[in-house]
Amino acid sequence: MSYSLRLLTAIAAAKAARTLSRICRHGGSTFPGIVAEHIAPGISRQLAQQLTRGRFLVSGTNGKTTTTRVLSAILRHAGWRVVHNRQGANLPSGIAATLVLATDPLGSLNAYAGLFEVDEAYVPAITTIIQPTVALLHNLSRDQLDRYGELDHLLRLWRETFVDHPTSATVVANADDPLVVRALEHIETPIVWYGFSLPESQNSTPIDFTDARYCSCGAVLSYRSILYGHFGQWYCRQCGRERPPLDVSGSQPILRGAAGSRFSAKIADAHFDITIQLPGFYNAANVLGALAAAVAGGVPPNTAVAPLAQISPAYGRGELVESESHRLRLWLVKNPMGFLQALTTALYDQSPRGVLLMAINDRIADGQDVSWLWDVDFEKALTADSFSAIVCSGTRACDIAVRLKYAGMPVDRLIIREQLLTGVETAFALAQGDSILPVFATYTAMRALRELFVRLRWVGPEWEV
């Protein structure tokens, strides 16, 4: 395939930009893409045309990075050569960088399939660029209001992409999320629905914390069974809307805290017993979504299931870090739903009255509006018996301390250390040597902590994760 001098120059410049970024110790996950698109506008769309085996788009508020990590392992186990934005650079510049850096100097990709985690607000733009063959729509919940606005905005974006202007993609969607189902109402193309089938409970009233309390008809939703948050077997008593029938279903989940979980899966007429190292019910849902997308993309079910037990947590998603004297488990938190699930999972096997570290920043990448902390149901997840101390760190250390105070946590156990290094040192001094220190951090706080851990040689550089 022949390319113009402009495009080849863009590729060379992007690779040089990546090298410079690494020399300067700045990861460089998006900068090469910005350089390439500036020199050769439209380069991403041009390179994506080489991915003739399949182009997978994965989007949602929570679980994108883990789901694409699982899907990548499945595709590689199936023998596919895949280009994947595995560092989570999920904006157009990150997609451009991923494609450009996977080419040789003459512009040929070293892969014939693409796997792209996509920011939920950029689904329309990136769909136009890569023209996905499989689009996995995972979930929607409240996130950074100063970046995304209300959920209705994202619902409109997804509807415009897949309903108002249909693509040729096979849409794989989470039936347990009434918001995802609402976004895809009246779509003309077939959908592969996935979700969990649990025994029906007596509680058919909405849960306390929910981003989807109401049906599109305006009535309050009811649930035959609830997974977590607003996910479950939902239905409307007034208009009759209900969770769609499942094409790929999970059942009989057994949760083992940070150690992972087990569940059964039904794909077509085949049944599988699945064990994963990924913690929490939400990760079982991530895995189920990845399985559904892989099968929709042409991977045989037996092949798709095979590598799941070996997949470890992604960067900051329950990742275990070991120092000379302590062990830390890192939990990236960005929104109310994700924070609550991470906290609940971490405390499942936490030592009684252990120490927690919460590092909350308010930089642009985190979202500068931290009012979302008041929507995290700390009252449900924490009691005074859950911990001996919570070290509050980061630029908004005082905000998380105030939120925890109003959640009923004893003030004398809330320790404010705004500097991250001081926060880690304080938590280490308070923690028992044989316990695991859970660290809950927003995006830029997590990056800063990991840079510290790299200098201490506890972990490798981010691009080696």
Image (cartoon, helix red, strand yellow):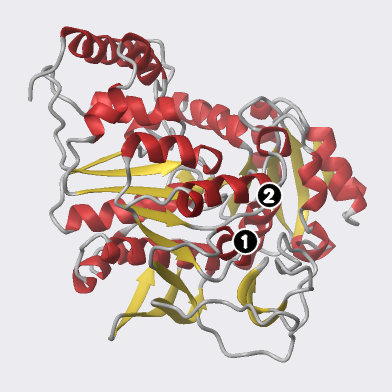
Q: Residue type at mark 1?
A: Leu
Q: Which mark is residue 400?
A: none
Q: Is residue 168 above or below residue 322?
A: below
Amino acid carrying label 2: it is Leu
Q: Which mark is residue 179?
A: 1
- Quarter of the image with the C terminus is top left
Q: x, y percentage for residue 405? A: 90, 49
Q: From mark 1 to mark 2, how far is it between C-alphas?
A: 9 Å
Q: Would residue 328 be visible to someone looking at this image?
A: no
Residue located 52% across and 77% down the image: 244
* Residue depicted at x 90% and y 46%: 412
In the rendered image, residue 217, in percent from the top left (x then y), is placed at: 74, 69
How many numbered marks does the figure carry?
A: 2
Looking at the image, do the residues carrying marks 1 and 2 touch, with CB atoms under 8 Å apart?
A: yes
Q: Quadrant of residue 181?
A: bottom right
Say if 174 sits above or below 120 in the image: below
Residue at the left extreme?
1
Where residue 268 appears, as percent x and y from the top left, is: 29, 81
Identify the image quadrant of the N terminus: top left
Quarter of the image for residue 360 reads: top right
**Element type where label 2 sits in the image:** helix
Which residue carries the number 2 mark?
151
